[in-house]
Image (spheres, grey):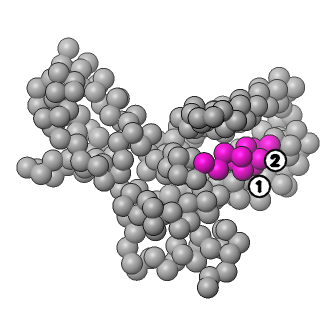
Amino acid sequence: MAESTSINIFEILKKELTNLTIKPGEKLEEAEMCERFSVTRPPIRTVFQRLQDIGLLEVVPYKGATATLISLSSVHQIIHLRTAVEAWIIRDFIASSPSMIDLEEMEHNVRLQKLIYQQPIVDEKEFFRLDSALHQFWFDRMNCSGIWQMIQSDLNYERFRMLDFVGTQGYVNIVKDHEKLLDAIRNSRSEDIVPILSVHLNAGLARMGNLIRNDYKEYFTLDEENNEYWVNYNAKLAGLKRK
């Protein structure tokens, strides 16, 4: 029973840390968690340790636990990795001659994305789910679901994606990129996949741009040594010249 309780608490807090219900840098108090989940301290300590093991919490003895900050360097690297791998997957998917049912399923997903952002209040978590489901589609079709799960397991990157959705609300441009990808798939234009996907996956960094160093700076690990690099990198992505 105690193990089952710990697992349930772990899953709840993992979800809240990943979808930014619990913000990067936010403190989690043992006593508060005990009261919330109606448990004693040992299960909470076990959960905190597990969350630390997967990089979502930093636990300091006698000082408590804090949600880890988002590593911009790690985000940058996973985007490069994902671009290379996913572009290959999509080109293989094109070569497999997707069926009309496959195409309709993807197009239906994109139509739902549009419906989400057209609502007066956007459900960013549902948009996030649909976005992930679309990209997962071609991994699954190419029997590479394990690779997709590996990408999804980078929770630092997942938190960045959610922050991009919440902070910039760039839903229209995200959907336009998805439509470009589907058009290239539908018309077997494999040569267009790399440029479209590269722009699409890097767009989050471009959109966040100055927000990373201003509005959300307390959410990120940003050392001064690399700050100049990120200023130039984001300016390049956004097609801007530094003043």
Q: Amino acid at mark 2?
A: Lys
In-image side of 219 versus 133 (left or right) = left
Q: Percent from the top left, x then y, of residue 23? A: 36, 47
Q: Earlier in the sequence, mark 1 or mark 2?
A: 2
Residue at the extreme top of the image, as rendered? 1
Residue receiving disc 1: 196
Which quadrant: the N terminus? top left
Would residue 206 appear left or right of 69 to someone viewing this image? right
**Residue placed most toward the observer, 44 or 171:** 171
User: In the shown orientation, is residue 233 left or right of residue 158?
Assistant: right
Q: Which of the 4 image quarters holds residue 126?
A: top right
Residue 78 colored magenta? no
Q: In this view, which residue lies farthest toward the front?
A: 120
Q: Dot 1: what SS? A: helix
As drawn, the label of residue 180 is: 2
Q: Residue at x 30, y 31 (%)?
A: 10
Q: Quadrant of the C terminus?
A: bottom right
Residue range (magenta): 169-179
**Considering depth in this image, is 13 or 91 the residue closer to the camera?**
13
CA gap, disc 1 to disc 2? 7 Å
Q: Position of residue 39 (x, y in %)?
A: 15, 23
The answer to whether any part of residue 88 appears in the image is no
Query: Residue, x 54% and y 75% (percent of image)?
Result: 231
Percent across and percent down for residue 151 are 53, 45
Q: Are marks 1 and 2 in contact (CB under 8 Å)?
A: yes
Residue 177 drawn in magenta: yes
How many numbered marks, from 0 up? 2
Identity, as a three-letter code, of the amino acid under mark 1: Ile
Rendered view: 72 above or below 48: below
Q: Residue at x 77, y 27 (%)?
A: 108
Magenta segment, principal secondary structure?
helix
Q: Which mark is residue 51?
A: none
